[in-house]
Image: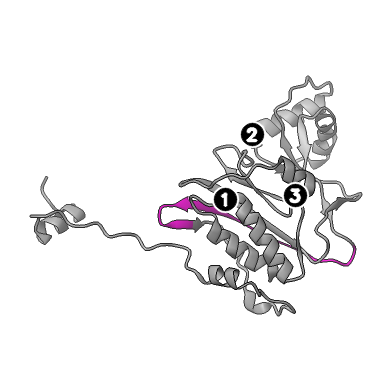
């Protein structure tokens, strides 16, 4: 429930003129009410064509060092963001274990690969996925892909998406969606299909300010265009429906 409410409030805050750090602070406040923690350092990125991790971001639960380095940014009209809210019942500090990932993405580095299998694998990565992340399961010959990825990763042609863990016995939830900043308000174009009625939470949102924000409507009503003076309604109708001979 903490993750659901935090994502719904973030959705209402990603609007032109809004600040990314304000979203960070608000998600922290939601977590505190539910006795949960946003996962430290998770970034939501502005999306661009062929670029899913541009420089404008929203950070979750930043550490002291991240706070010193992070620069808040202002949301602008017609931007697109992938909002990623990850909440934990633990301390929110993720850690790696022995699990090997299958998900990678290209970097901007260059290197002349030595192994034939690595060159064939990397060529397929470039042609099929370009700069977007991919899974080794997407290859017809997954065994050869697992061989080729080693040299590519060792020489930083590919960057792995590591599998991260919380402490044993804790629970983690992720809500992720894409939002467009439109003139009539933010527009969510992907849906988590989450039904809050199936969850019975032991804690609830107590913050009065956030309750008010959560209750607000997301989209504004579009303003109707005024008819031009001196133009009859019949002429207007004909022009709009395309029935005029001209």
Q: Residue at x 72, y 40 (%)?
A: 69
Nearer-N-terminus badge (3/2): 3
Circle 2: is it few (<14), some (14-19), or many (20+) Cα within 10 Å?
Answer: some
Left or right: 78 in relation to 149:
left
Image coordinates for residue 201, horizontal then vertical, percent: 72, 78
Mark 2 — residue? 130
Q: Give the CA distance from mark 2 to mark 1.
A: 32 Å
Q: What quarter of the picture does the N terminus occupy?
A: bottom right
Of labels 2 and 1, the one closer to you: 1
Q: Main secondary structure of the magenta part?
A: strand
Mark 1 — residue? 19
Image coordinates for residue 208, horizontal then vertical, percent: 60, 73
Image coordinates for residue 65, horizontal then vertical, percent: 78, 44
Of labels 3 and 2, the one closer to you: 3
- Quarter of the image for residue 177 reads bottom right
Residue stretch in magenta: 168-186
Asked if 58 appears above or below 89 in the picture, the reply is above
> Label for residue 41?
3
Image coordinates for residue 115, horizontal then vertical, percent: 84, 24
Are the residues at dot 2 and dot 1 in contact (C-beta closer than 8 Å)? Answer: no
In reply to whether residue 169 is colored magenta, the answer given is yes
Circle 3: is it few (<14), some (14-19), or many (20+) Cα within 10 Å?
Answer: some
Report whether residue 175 is seen: no
Q: What quarter of the picture does the C terminus occupy?
A: top left
The residue closer to the viewer here, 181 or 141, is 181
């Amino acid at each position: 429930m903490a993750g659901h409410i935090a994502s719904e409030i973030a959705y209402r805050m990603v609007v032109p003129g809004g600040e990314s750090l304000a979203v960070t602070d608000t998600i922290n406040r939601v977590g505190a009410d539910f006795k949960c923690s946003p996962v430290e350092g998770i970034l939501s990125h502005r999306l661009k064509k062929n670029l899913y991790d541009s420089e404008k971001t929203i950070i979750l639960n930043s550490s002291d060092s991240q706070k010193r380095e992070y620069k808040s940014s202002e949301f602008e009209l017609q931007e697109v963001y992938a909002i990623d809210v990850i909440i934990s019942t633990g301390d929110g500090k993720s850690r790696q274990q022995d699990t090997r990932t299958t998900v990678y993405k290209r970097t901007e580095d260059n290197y002349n690969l030595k192994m034939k299998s690595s060159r064939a694998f990397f060529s397929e990565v470039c042609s099929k996925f370009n700069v977007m992340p991919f899974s080794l399961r997407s290859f017809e010959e997954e065994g050869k892909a697992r061989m080729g990825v080693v040299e590519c990763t060792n020489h930083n042609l590919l960057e792995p998406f590591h599998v991260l863990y919380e402490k044993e016995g804790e629970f983690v939830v992720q809500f992720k969606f894409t939002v467009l900043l439109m003139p009539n308000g933010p527009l969510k174009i992907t849906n988590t299909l989450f039904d809050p009625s199936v969850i019975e939470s032991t804690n609830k949102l107590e913050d009065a300010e956030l309750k008010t924000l959560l209750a607000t409507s997301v989209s504004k009503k579009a303003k109707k265009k005024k008819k031009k003076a001196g133009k009859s309604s019949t002429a207007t109708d004909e022009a709009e429906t395309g029935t005029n001979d001209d």
